[in-house]
């Protein structure tokens, strides 16, 4: 406690220097230095397996020739040359086997905004979902999809395309014939588009509980099951249709040649020969 006349304390030269430094620092703009994130890219020695835009990647040796891998990323990309497979997702976890070609995919579980593409000849198959399980066998591929499934297939050679949506789905892609089988479940919407001999486009649209496409059967068929409604401008379709089950039979070129509908209380069969004008 100081009493009496006001006293003045001289801080001395050190304190004065500190004050000058504080003033100088106050005049310097504050700069934030953000470290640029490191992106991981991977490619095996032969270029069979590629993973890009990865934030985390791990490999574990599980056998003399096999590796288990986990890749994470906001939108990572993966591709396998022999399978003609490319995909993007948030996570890919699977097993790969070392061969003369490189790391060939044995299986994979893919999650997080999944987009995958398979190419077979002139046919391109695109699928979107929240999760997918991939099971390759030779050049074929079995794919299980779940969570907001969107399936698209285009074949310019045949002049056909398929667009379908559902909650879950399964597709089987053959090395030679492309998408041989496919099924979708849960509020399925489908549009089949084909090019007529006149070069005009024809459309067949449907809503159903289930969709089964079987191009490997003889004859090939598209089957709609459960609360089916079919409409469109395809000349093979005689008119709009509501039924419990509808089977569209295809010829060897994938053109519709017969439509059979069943339901209660009766059975309806609609056919058009020649597959349209």
Image: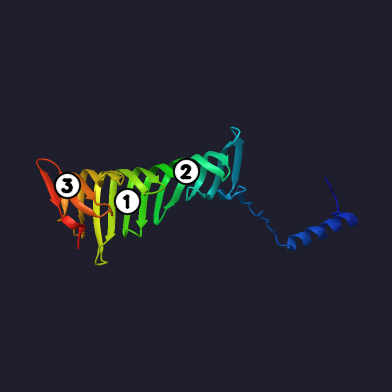
Hey, which residue is sitting farthest right in the picture?
Answer: 13
Residue 111's label in the rendered image is: 2
The nearer-to-camera label among 2 and 3 is 3
Residue 230 horizontal side relative to residue 16, left or right = left
Q: Residue at x 39, y 46 (%)?
A: 173
Residue closer to the observer: 147 or 251? 251
Residue 260's label in the rendered image is: 3
Residue marked by disc 1: 164
Q: Secondary structure at mark 2?
A: strand
Give whichever of discs 3 and 1 has the lower sequence position. Answer: 1
> Circle 2: is it few (<14), some (14-19), or many (20+) Cα within 10 Å?
many
Q: Secondary structure at mark 1?
A: strand
Residue closer to the observer: 254 or 166? 254
Horizontal and vertical percent position of residue 65: 59, 36
The nearer-to-camera label among 3 and 1 is 3
- When the figure is inspected, residue 68 is found, relative to residue 118, above or below; the finding is above
Residue closer to the observer: 124 or 253? 253
Give whichever of discs 1 and 2 has the lower sequence position. Answer: 2
Give whichever of discs 2 and 3 has the lower sequence position. Answer: 2
Q: Residue at x 32, y 56 (%)?
A: 161
* Residue 11 visible in the picture: no
């Amino acid at each position: 406690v100081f009493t009496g006349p006001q006293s003045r304390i001289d801080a001395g030269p050190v304190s004065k220097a500190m004050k000058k430094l504080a003033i100088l620092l106050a005049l310097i703009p504050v700069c934030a230095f953000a470290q640029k994130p490191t992106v991981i890219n991977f490619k095996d020695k032969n270029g069979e397996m590629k993973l890009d835009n990865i934030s985390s990647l791990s490999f574990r040796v599980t056998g003399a020739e096999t590796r288990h891998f986990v890749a994470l990323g906001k939108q990572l990309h993966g591709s396998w040359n022999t399978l003609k497979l490319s995909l993007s997702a948030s996570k890919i976890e699977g097993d790969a086997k070392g061969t003369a070609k490189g790391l060939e995919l044995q299986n994979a579980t893919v999650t997080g905004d999944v987009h995958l593409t398979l190419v077979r000849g002139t046919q391109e198959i695109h699928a979107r979902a929240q999760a997918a399980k991939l099971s390759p066998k030779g050049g074929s591929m079995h794919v299980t999809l779940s969570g907001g499934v969107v399936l698209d297939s285009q074949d310019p050679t045949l002049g056909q395309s398929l667009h379908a949506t559902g909650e879950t789905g399964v597709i089987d892609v053959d090395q030679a014939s492309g998408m041989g089988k496919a099924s979708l479940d849960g509020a399925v919407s489908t549009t089949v588009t084909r090019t007529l001999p006149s070069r005009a486009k024809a459309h067949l649209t449907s809503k159903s509980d289930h969709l089964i496409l079987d191009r490997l059967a003889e004859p090939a068929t598209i089957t709609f099951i459960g609360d089916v409604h079919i409409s469109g401008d395809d000349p093979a379709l005689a008119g709009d249709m509501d039924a419990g089950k509808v089977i569209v039979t295809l010829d060897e070129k994938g053109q519709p040649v017969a439509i059979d509908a069943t339901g209660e209380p009766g059975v309806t069969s609609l056919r058009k020969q020649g597959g349209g004008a």
